[in-house]
Image (cartoon, helix red, strand yellow):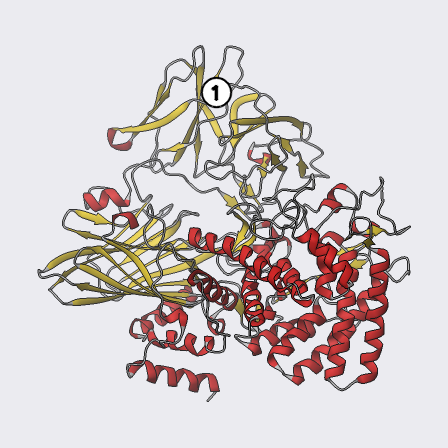
Amino acid sequence: MKLEQIYMIILILFSQSGFCQNKEIFLSNLNASKDSPLYTTYAAQMERSEFILDEGFHFLFYDPERGIDFTSDTGGDMCIAFKCGPKYVYHVKDMYREPLIHASYSDIVTYSYFPFPDIKVDATFLVYSSRIAIHNLKIQNTGKGQIDLKLFAFLQNNYRTFNDIHLNKTEHKITFTHEELPDSWVLEHNIPYVDKVYNVFMLSEQPERMTCFRSYRWGNIALPLKIDLNINQKYIVWGMMSHAGGERCRHDNPKPKLLVILNDDSSKIITETASKWGRADKNINPYGFYSIELGNFSQIKSGDRYTMSLFCPETVEYASLRGTIGNLDTMNATRYDVVFDQNEIVPIPGNLKKDFWGGGAEIRLYWDKHVEHVSYNVYRCDYRKNRVYELIADKINRTFFTDKNIQGDKIYGYVVTGIDANGKMSMPTNEVTNIFRSDFLTDIKYPDQIRTDVTDLARVVSMQKNMTIKPGESINLRIIRGFARNERNLEEITQQAKTLFSENLTQFIAYNEKLYASVPKYSFNDADKEMLYWSAWNLMRQVMLPAEGKCGYNYYVFSREPTWGWGHGGQVFHESLTMLAYAFMDPQSAMNSQRVYLERQHKNGYINYRTGPYLDEIIEVNGEFTSSAPWYAWQNWQVYKITQDKKFLEEMYQSSKQFFDYYVSNHDKDQDGLYEWGGHAVLESVRDARVAVWDQVGWPTNFEALDLNTMLANEAMTLAAMAEELGRAHDASIWTEKAKNLSNLINKTFWDEESGFYYHVDRDDHDFSFSSENNLKRQEIIGFLPLWAGIATEKQAKRLVTHLTNDKKFWRKYGIPSLAADDIYYNDKGYWNGPVWVEWNYLIVEGLIKYGYHEQAKELVDRIAVNMMAQLKKDHNFWEFYSPDSQWAGYHKTYIWAGIINRMLIDIANLSR
């Protein structure tokens, strides 16, 4: 029997004998409200997780306008509602007492709330595995009278829809499918995925009713984008949307609108709802890009002309372009970046609404008359056929239209445009559909009066359980949701779910308490900071996955929930800096994560840019392979200092030595002893977009790279320390000499005495001028790396700290920005031109400590923590980066490297010991 199995048996015995929460473990003894800075995303423990089909959940307990839902990005949300007498309670704002969280780990949360004055709910939610989630409810009558209660356990999908629905009341289950479509990155990198997911939704007792609906509430129902991955794209027009100031248009509510007309023929139009072919990304994505497949117009051909209009409702700005379809035999895409402006166009008709007549056989559309001397076009698309809108009413003068041509189970979408006296057309209205009388809330009020028999395009599936609870009595219910790859796998998951109806969930709390017992513990004067600290451990633990595919060891992804391709491919060196903290919690899996690189290392020492279970991403450019920034030896050394595992050190010394030798052999094109970024140099440099020098001066290979040389000098210093620890004094002296020589060259070449800062230099003549005088003198965050590496002299360090603590440059309210705030390219919500990247701030903190600037280091950590805590209170999540100037965060959430804040807190706490 394996040790892990013995350990689990011990935990089960403890839990069954009454042992529950360890009073010394912080995360087992919470009283966290919506205003607490607690991370509330949950995914399965590493040993019960997998890569290809993996579902995590975010606990949305803090939004008064939502229920206490467990949400997912693409799989739909698990929801609970109650009805007592005439009162229905779902929204947090309607509850008698809002939820409080009592224990929270990376995979499990326990909490309680009162939906009604005398009804207390004690709940446990566990992501048991990548395929199964368990929601356990203990519902207690705390009053003096008997209570009749109805519970609604339902799933709601705002991403796409539920299809192939089968209700099985006898077996207490609903089965259905939903889509989880891969993004372009996954498709381009041939990462395996499951796009049609089979589901089972089960209740521990037989429900009184099972129902399914096309919407949650009465009103217009938005239908998802039609996507066919099996059709190659025909002709895509795409580009970036920007506002006049240069900032990307990333407005999300409401989103930008798009309209295309082909060959000046307005009888057919396509909009941002048009179908996608061969790819699953949205036509308007969250990062300021649009795309549209012109193949939606049937029989397009080379030379066809298109007119495109875009509109940002948030700023009431427009953009337009005209283009010609290129040679379809040689090209299938054109990029046009657009800039919005405030040029006047025909106003959009307002407030489009609908009524149904004849039992849903006819639909009446009506809208506001918004301006004089304008007529209206009415368009309709058949959702079961395509996403092209066809003109069904041309230049009508009235503000209503009745469509009497609704056939069978057709699902139609309608939009209206305005036409001015010159024939110029407005952007279309928001769409309305003809979906009729199939909503969950109406059914709550009037059971069996509306359609509950839909089998596709559903947004809600529900089970209703009626209970009569006596005073002091409690009823236990368990809800399970399972995910499967196919019908056969669904049956396996269903059988496993049945066994979990009797599983004791306290054992999973005990397992976490044992795991978290090794985490360094400190006395925090600030309760919020303590919660930030422990939340970071949850984040780090959560992204770990077991050996799978090409990975013979456990590895990590950037995020489990939400799952996005680029963040789910596998490991990369700069994210692995997180192991410098994670190793305190689980030293073995931290070391194994580093071994993933070793086992995939090429014979010549090269290590992939990204390494995952189904990915070896090398990115070849001009015959050169792209690697990642050389932090490898330093990471291995820092992990060893925590684990003290000599076997690991021996393995990683050899691997790190090979990697260093490869790097220096391939990154010095001019053989002058200084190094340049290579391969796809922007990606290799880590700072992969919106870098002042890259964007406004030149491509990275044109420069001797300050950051790269500093990292390589630090690698040589680290290899010396590793060799010394292994008793290899001769090797250590060689590495020390290499580090010394490169450090001297860095100070001689990259330091500017006049400004007291480090910069890149021109590769050819080693000055600070490339295409114009001193245009490389851009004060970026990399200028402080010589502090981290210990290369700067005491005098240089003092001048660097002067810049660092200048509030007009780097000493901002919430941390150190990636570019000085007085630079013309600075944008606190940009990318590598302003925001606070937590891992890079960690390097600065280490540098400050190394040079004795302890108070500055403490203050910097405090500034960073304040913004992170504010965001956790707002949305209970960690983010890729944060604004240095305001309480804002972006772009990707649940992001692994934000978790390194706990290493910063550890190092600051140790200064006082």
Q: Nearer the viewer, residue 631 or 322?
A: 631
The residue lying at 28 percent from left, 81 percent from top is 18
How many marks on residues? Answer: 1
The residue lying at 79 percent from left, 45 percent from top is 698
Location of residue 289 by image quarter: top right
**Residue 138: percent from left, percent from top:** 24, 66
Locate residue 168 relative to residue 664 in the image: left or right.
left
Location of residue 131 by image quarter: bottom left
Position of 814 relative to 857 (above/below): above
**Residue 9: percent from left, percent from top:** 38, 85
**Residue 306 visible in the snapshot:** no
Indicate the amino acid at tag 1: Pro
Residue at which label 1 appears: 347
Name the residue at the bottom extreme. Answer: 1
Position of 447 relative to 477 (above/below): above
**Residue 44 visible in the snapshot:** yes
Q: Nearer the viewer, residue 599 or 590?
A: 590
**Residue 302: percent from left, percent from top:** 68, 31
Q: Nearer the viewer, residue 333 or 779?
A: 779
Locate residue 439 relative to residue 889 in the image: left or right.
left
The residue lying at 46 percent from left, 52 percent from top is 870
Name the residue at the left extreme. Answer: 145
Q: Residues within 10 Å of mark 1 (few under 14, many from 20)?
A: some
Q: Which corner quadrant holds the C terminus?
A: bottom right
Locate residue 481 relative to residue 54 in the image: left or right.
left
**Residue 572: percent from left, percent from top:** 65, 63
The residue lying at 61 percent from left, 76 percent from top is 591
Q: Secondary structure at mark 1?
A: loop
